Image (tube, rainbow, N blue to C red):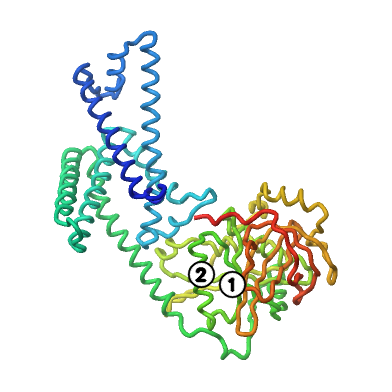
Amino acid sequence: SNGVASFRPPEARHARSTLLVLAAVLTFLLLGTTLLATWTHALPYAAGTPTVVSQEVQAVFGSTGLGHTAFLLVQLATLLVLYTGGNTSFNGFPFLASYVAGDRFLPRQLTKRGHRLVFSNGILVLAAVALVLIVAFGARLDSLIALYAIGVFTGFSLAGLGMVVKHLKERGSRWRARVVVNGLSSSVTALVVVIFLVVKFNEGAWIIAVVGPLMYFGLLRINRQYRSESEVFDHGGGTPGGGGIRTRRIIIFVDSLDVATERALEYCQALSIHSVRAVHFDVDPRVTRELEDQWSRAGAITFGIDLEVASCDDRRIDRAALEVVADAVRDPEVFCMVLLPRRGLSSRLGRLLHDRTADAISKAVSHVPRTAATIVPYYEVGDARDQLETAADVKVGAIRPQPHLAADELLESKAKEARQIGSLNYRERAQVAGRISAVASSRSDSFVETRCTLSDSTGSITLVFQGRASVPGLDRGARLMVSGMVGARGSDAVMLNPDYEIVVPAPPPAG
């Protein structure tokens, strides 16, 4: 049921047809294996070998010549079927866990996709649990199959019960018949669960009886933790803005005059702010769209700062942040401050249920010259505590660069005469080529403009299109050839309303 959305439209009809085919194949195999076991008098051995299927194959095909070849083929097919069955869990559980985590009943780390667009954390959790069960039960199939059956039929029973409740509430067409069918299926599957618990209790089924209630209350506890945090952080933040502050002071606690103290003093000298950028990395398109909508509505809170949405194709946010910061300090006269908002959580459970992305970004950008990273926590009211954290050394080489894609090779082949962005001079006309890494737009009563950050391996330049709320085709990931006059906004290089050619269109959004 978790994979219904993966079918082609109409999803429900195709999923129903697939389910009927699977049920027919399963019924055929089960009845065929049972009848052959009766006719060939195949019996299960306590040692597990030879298996019932292997006895049936030898009785039907024989054990010599082509019969032995057929025996090996059936054994191989059985192995592949078992492999597919095991792999099904690794396909379905991460999706299910992401749905439950999205409803805030599991840690939200399970909702994040990894580098290969799969729910990596869910796969790792399932692998760890599977290894523990295999070791604990000595890989005994008779004991493990009981746990599997109890888990599967418990899901069936709860699904049927949920459908009964749904039909009783909605009372649609033929709701009474639907209540009877779903109630019957729920009752039968629940009876199977009870039978397995009783018969296999001493063989390991007791674990379900103990762990099941603990898991249930654990899910409720996690949900209660997330809801209490939501009440504090989403609704209890106080009044926005800082207009009442007139004097700003900085206190530096110095133990010795070392490199760390020098960095802090340099940080103080850089507090004459030239520009403020708010950057969001597009890892989840749905979250990005919601953030853009919230940002556009929250003018009093954002102080008129535009939100830049930058690409992060490999989903390594620390690498993407390192790239943005390194580009910002290419000019040796620029000092960059990186502010990382973070929820300050005092409870151990609260810290466990959140990742440490801010720490990872801070570690990565701290190696960039003329850069200081500051984590800005917001603590629960009345429970703020100093959090002393020690950051381990991070090698810059661990942050892998952006991969060289086929689109970049095509751009290089067409832009042989283009200048490198890092070599441009003020007030000169030039042709450059690169990739759009970020897009931002500004709207007010008096003007509207769209800004695109064009980057190559040597630097970046901002393309400014005045009077246009959006420019078709200029999306993150597009490769362009651009020509125009190089200007400046402060210390940033810009091209105002340049001519451009789209060499490679932007890829479709993931998710």
Q: Secondary structure at mark 2?
A: helix
Q: Distance of mark 2 from mark 1, alpha carbons?
A: 9 Å
Mark found first going from the N terminus, 2 or 1? 2
Using the image as rendered, state which of residue 152 and residue 207 is in the foreground: 152
**Residue sitting at x 34%, y 10%:** 63
Residue that appears at 47% across and 56% down: 112
The image quadrant of residue 329 is bottom right
* Horizontal relation, residue 369 to residue 192: left or right: right
Q: Amino acid at mark 2?
A: Leu
Q: Seen in the image, is 257 located left or right of residue 441?
A: right
Q: Residues within 10 Å of mark 1 (few under 14, many from 20)?
A: many
Kindly identify the residue that appears in the image at 54 percent across and 62 percent down: 357
**What x and y, as percent, mark residue 296?**
53, 76
Q: Position of residue 380 (x, y in %)?
A: 43, 76
Characterize the local packing of mark 2: few (<14), some (14-19) or many (20 or more) Cα atoms within 10 angstroms. Answer: some
Q: Secondary structure at mark 1?
A: strand
Q: Which residue is mark 2?
A: 291
Residue 184 % position (x, y): 15, 48
Tell me the amino acid under the disc marked 1.
Leu
Label 2 close to label 1 by CB (< 8 Å): yes
Name the quadrant containing residue 242.
bottom right
Dot 1 corresponds to which residue? 307
In front: 314, or 454? Answer: 454
> Total marks drawn?
2
Residue 298 is situated, as x and y percent measured from the top left of the image, at: 51, 79
Say whether residue 209 is left or right of residue 414: left
Q: Is residue 511 above or below residue 231?
A: above
Res. 63 mark? none
Q: Nearer the viewer, residue 217 or 266?
A: 217
Q: Nearer the viewer, residue 389 or 290?
A: 290
Q: Most extreme residue toward the top, as rendered?
A: 64
Q: Is residue 81 left or right of residue 280?
A: left
